[in-house]
Image (tube, helix red, strand yellow):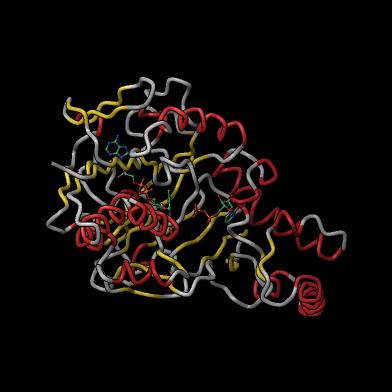
Amino acid sequence: MYDCIIVGAGVAGAVCARKLAEEKRKKVLVIERRDHIGGNCYDEPDEFGVLIHNYGPHIFHTGMEEVFAFFSRFTEWYLFGHEVVAKVNDSLIPVPFNLNTLHMVYEKEKADRLEKKLIETYGEGSRVPIMKLRESEDNDIREIARYVYENVFLRYTMKQWGQKPEEISPEVTGRVPVIISRDNRYFADKYQGVPKNGFTPMFARMLDHENITVCLHTDCKDLLTMEEGEELRILYKGEPYHGDVIYTGALDELFDCRYGRLPYRSLDFQFEHYDKDSYQGHSVVNYTVSEEFTRITEFKFLTGQKDAQGTTIVKEYPFSYTGAAGEIPYYAILDKENEALYQKYKALVSGNHKFHLLGRLAEYKYYNIDIMAKKALELAEQI
Ligand code: FAD
Ligand code: UDP
């Protein structure tokens, strides 16, 4: 009765479902084990009426017109240039480290000289990963690199990953490069912001289509069975299923972690409400040299909400995911060993060309919302 079954109602599942239902006229069943749609982008008002992001701060940002246009069908936007500051001792400095930060850290004459050298070496407007900056043979540039490494990256990365910056994939620290310009924005993308009324209403509209059925509170294993043989067969409610299945959950879980768990970092979110207008006056403050948490988000500065009483913040405490009940695998740990383990699991499904892996969990990748949406649109197109 369903042409396609999608496991997971996050970005990957919702975008794919809409395109399949609308353009391909497929009857789609979306199975979601949580009691809500939206995956980790889910947001809702807390008990004080403050719109919070339950799974950590989410800012939509993209340079892809197609993705922006797709989402814009389901929401209006509160657009801004997202800025982050880092608390270093008693100062708040712009992150990514840029020429404004340089002038806050060094006295004028030295900052002017260093700025000139950075521009001459890398070009105005360039974005240089910290690990690349550290390789410089120039003493001045090495000094800047040392400052940035020690004051922005080392402690934050140790908290977030339990490893030093040089021990993790360069792709990860490369997300926050040193910027050779006066641009204080965290992202370089043309469009940055949040859905005007929140992510959840946007996903609700996306999934609201006559060809889409959403089944919450349901683990896919309650409805789907993987039958291994020469090729993987899928049963829906015990009967052979011949439609397409798009799986956006963790791949190891599908096979009861038989080769061992895929390693992830998780986060413990501590929400606090204050009966005052502002807690920190910024949407996001990164704690790069102190504290056990990595960052504090103050939601009303992120969402632009004006009608809430008081203010709600969240602190993020990273830890190593163990798979215990209630823990959520947030970040894949990108290294060769983990990729090899992932490929072992992937081999179990690769025989069935109607079984598709899509999403940050299912593909064991560090995807942002926009690239996730792009991949979901592409997969739906291909189906
Ligand atoms: P998910 O959102 O994880 O959705 C997967 C869904 O599948 C979940 O709802 C899950 O419950 C469901 N599921 C899993 N297994 C099963 C099962 N067995 N049965 C039924 N359902 C199942 N990206 C940005 O672009 N900007 C940001 O600012 C940003 N901030 C982030 C902050 C944090 C703390 C984190 C962790 C991520 C952030 N991201 C951000 C990334 C963003 O969250 C992801 O790109 C996006 O959520 C990925 O969507 P997804 O559908 O792949 O995964
Ligand atoms: N990072 C850091 N200090 C910062 C910001 C980022 O060390 O102030 C490093 C850290 O390793 C982090 C990575 O850069 O995990 C990517 O940062 P990003 O803000 O993109 O992480 P996310 O928002 O995805 O958690």
23 over 334 or under it: above or below: below
In-front residue for pair 383/220: 383
Q: Position of residue 130 (x, y in %)?
A: 70, 57
Residue 45 at least partly seen: no
274 over 168 or under it: above or below: below
Q: Is residue 122 left or right of residue 9?
A: right
178 over 116 or under it: above or below: above
Q: Quadrant of the N terminus?
A: top left
Q: Position of residue 323 (x, y in %)?
A: 40, 28
- Residue 141: quadrant of the picture: bottom right
Q: Is residue 40 left or right of residue 82?
A: left
User: Total label count?
Assistant: 0
Q: Which residue: 69% across, 63% down?
A: 128
Residue 374 at least partly seen: yes
Q: Which residue: 65% across, 69% down?
A: 179
Q: Is residue 143 left or right of residue 214?
A: right
Q: Position of residue 16 (x, y in %)?
A: 30, 53
- Residue 117: quadrant of the picture: bottom right
209 over 6 or under it: above or below: below
- Residue 77: quadrant of the picture: bottom left
Q: Which residue: 26% across, 26% down?
A: 225
Q: Position of residue 158 (x, y in %)?
A: 61, 43
